[in-house]
Amino acid sequence: MLEIFTAGFWSQYGALLAAGTRDTLIMTLVATVFAYVLGLPLGVALILTQPHGIRPCALLYRVLGWIINVGRSLPFIILMVAIMDFTKLIVGTKIGVLGAIPPLVISAAPFIARMVETSLAEVDAGVVEAAQSMGASTLQIVWKVYLPEAKPSLILGGSISIITILAYTAIAGAIGAGGLGDLAIRYGYQRRVDSMMLVTVIFLIALVQIIQSIFSRVSTRIDKRLK
């Protein structure tokens, strides 16, 4: 374990760790963006169509809720294997960084939808009713009431979502997705390079701490309740 403090270790594995960290960040950031493209509208649709929403629709609410619950129930590694043919159709490969992004998006989008729904549910109903009484349209209420009022909670939810996707990238490394998870398995487990396993874990912990710290500070700064 002490070899991680030696120049020999970093000269041998430094480039691999840098590339693995880069691949992990690419997978995490790209997947997060696309997962929010899918998950944010789903979360908004849930809050609008719920029984006490401004556009209640029991059938649509139940269908969306069922789809999201099914998506959240599938273990990521099973989902990744199950949709490999779909992944190849979309990005042209089943493995590597590109091959990991579609399953990451599909797995994270339902989770994000629920996070968004929970955040929007915290918005004061009185503020929404006031906007309705002033003749605001549904789209105006979403953009000018729900999303701005829920911004601190949405940002904290964003940190949880990113960290969750980051954890999924490590799992994706088990079947050739690349990144730090791949290095931990190939070198730390298969080749018994314990120091490599330790460093990848440290890197992942550091990334989680940095993400959580940044998002917590941003959320605190824009939270009107703390001013």
Image (cartoon, helix red, strand yellow):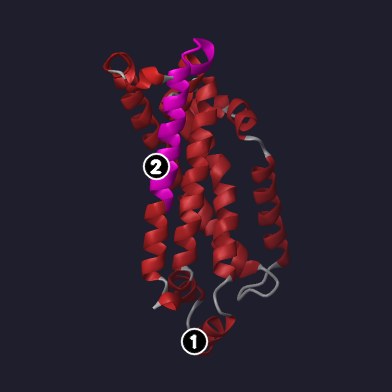
Q: Which residue is mark 2?
A: 29
Residue at the outermost top position: 191
Camera-nearest residue between 111 and 192: 192
Question: Label 1 belongs to which residue?
Answer: 135
Q: Is residue 23 visible?
A: yes
Q: Position of residue 111 (x, y in %)?
A: 58, 49
208 w.r.t. 79: above or below: below
Residue 225 lies in what quarter of the image?
bottom left
Q: Which numbered disc flags the more N-terminal residue, 2 or 1?
A: 2
Q: Position of residue 110 (x, y in %)?
A: 59, 49
Q: Secondary structure at mark 1?
A: loop
Classify the position of the N terminus by image quarter.
top left
> Image point 54% across, 21% down: which residue?
175
Which three-letter amino acid code belongs to the residue tagged 1?
Gly
> Could you give the CA–CA distance between mark 2 and mark 1, rounded to whole angstroms?
38 Å
Tell me the quarter of the picture where residue 19 sits: top left
Callout 2, which amino acid? Leu
Q: Range of the magenta residues?
A: 188-212
